[in-house]
Image: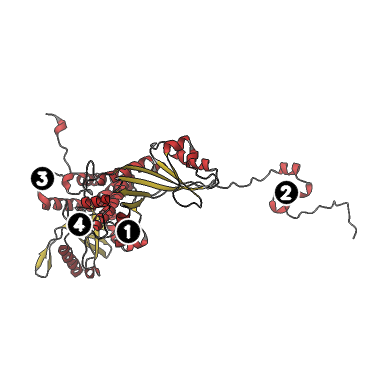
Amino acid sequence: MVEENWHEARLIPTSGINGADEQERRATSALLAVMTAVREFGRSLTKPFGAPAGAVETFIEVPFLLGESRFYPDGLIRVRRGQKAWTALVEVKTGANELAVPQLESYLDIAREQGFDAVITISNEIPAVAGQHPTKVDKRKLRKVALHHLSWTQVLAEAVMQKEFRGVADPDQAWILGELIRYLEHPRSGALEFDDMGESWVSVRESVRAGTLRATDKGVGEVAARFDALLRFACLSLGRQLGAEVVPVLSRKELAEPQLRTQSLVGSLVTTGQLVGAIRIPGTAGDLVITSDLRASSVTCHVDIDSPREGRPTTRVNWLARQLKSAPDTVRVEAFAMHARGPGAAELLRVVRENPASLIADPARDIKSFRVAMSVAMGPKRGRGRGAFIDSVLAGVDVFYLEVMQQLKAWSATPPKLRPEPSQEAVEQDVPPALVSTALSSQDGAEVAVPPHETTSP
């Protein structure tokens, strides 16, 4: 018998999953059990929702009566610390199943009657803005009970970051968390990645190319929201690899009113045929901006970086080129001059390396900043795989970060140096006797000393 064909026993097996109900039940039980077993992981998931730091207890399919009907929420989480207890009901969906408004509103009513703190939903739906819920419910039901959402991608990212970067104190608990990660990464677990731009993607894309798209067309808002969800998924995926919190860049108004962001994307799509967004990676020289041009069928990633504030223009260009010594020759570099309007001088990196002056449009003007950009072909398909829009965006982000962004460091001025104090011997040799002192204050307003044996007339 060949051992290569043997399957290793797993704490949370993916075999034997039959149907959506079994898939949801197993995913719920696995997640809640690991939250109890691995203290750090349980804390990382419940802390953002207002739970205290304490022992985590979890239950599945707890029965509740609401009126004359009996409900079975998928799970319940309770965190105790002293006399204080925080409790939340949990509703889970796997695969392509979406959260249902009537069910969520019933759970909110149950939570209010029982004096619970929150209802937490977990599904493959990724809201465009972190903290926003993908399902619209009656806001009156949220007066006393909070409604929170986790995507399975976010759960997986949190598990990986806790195990690989933040650490788990107990080795056995770390192994348990690793088993959950393996389970969630398996296709049969139902914890899917972002894999669809929506049914309106093809029609909107074709209208953009034909120049006939209008803001009132069906599906435009859905495509805009899906693009923001894709950016959020890109943040989670990249953050999982880096062990850092990568977030979309949004204004305060957009965070407070997500519809403003959607309106902005729709307007850009109609007027320019572009979907534009940015993500912020800790420790980098600038934000990573993603531009998906549906007319040109290209995805461009770029970063803006301030130029050094000293040195000649060619010195500043060489400062940037040295940092990009391992970047592809096809990277585009643009230089913006101080107090100049419009686009700057742009060239491919291979030209800049050979001739730094190619980025200097006016030698009399200092360079204010640079833009470094890389473009890839845009996939037209709505799903995942070869030739898909989602994969072209994700691949563009990963390659640009690997080959460009992680090489760049912001310029910083050289710290000023202290003025060295001259030695006593040097002072006595070079300075008149009346000024023999290393103290700077003694050199101001000194008078000629009168020898003791000499007197001055009145």
Q: How many marks?
A: 4
Q: Amino acid at mark 3?
A: Gly
Residue where numbered disc 2 is placed = 437
Left or right of residue 97, residue 455 in this image: right
Nearest the viewer among 281 and 54 is: 281
Secondary structure of the residue carrying numbered label 4? strand
Q: Report which quarter residue 142 is drawn in.
A: bottom left
The disc label shown at residue 58, or none: 4
Spatial CA span between label 2 and label 4:
77 Å
Q: Residue at x 40, y 41 (%)?
A: 332
The disc label shown at residue 16, or none: 3
Instruction: Give the color scheme: rainbow, by chain, secondary structure or one colour.
Output: secondary structure
Nearer the viewer's eye, disc 1 or disc 2? 1
Mark toward the start of the polypeptide (2 vs 4): 4
Nearer the viewer's eye, disc 3 or disc 4? 3
Residue where numbered disc 1 is placed = 264
Secondary structure of the residue carrying numbered label 1? helix
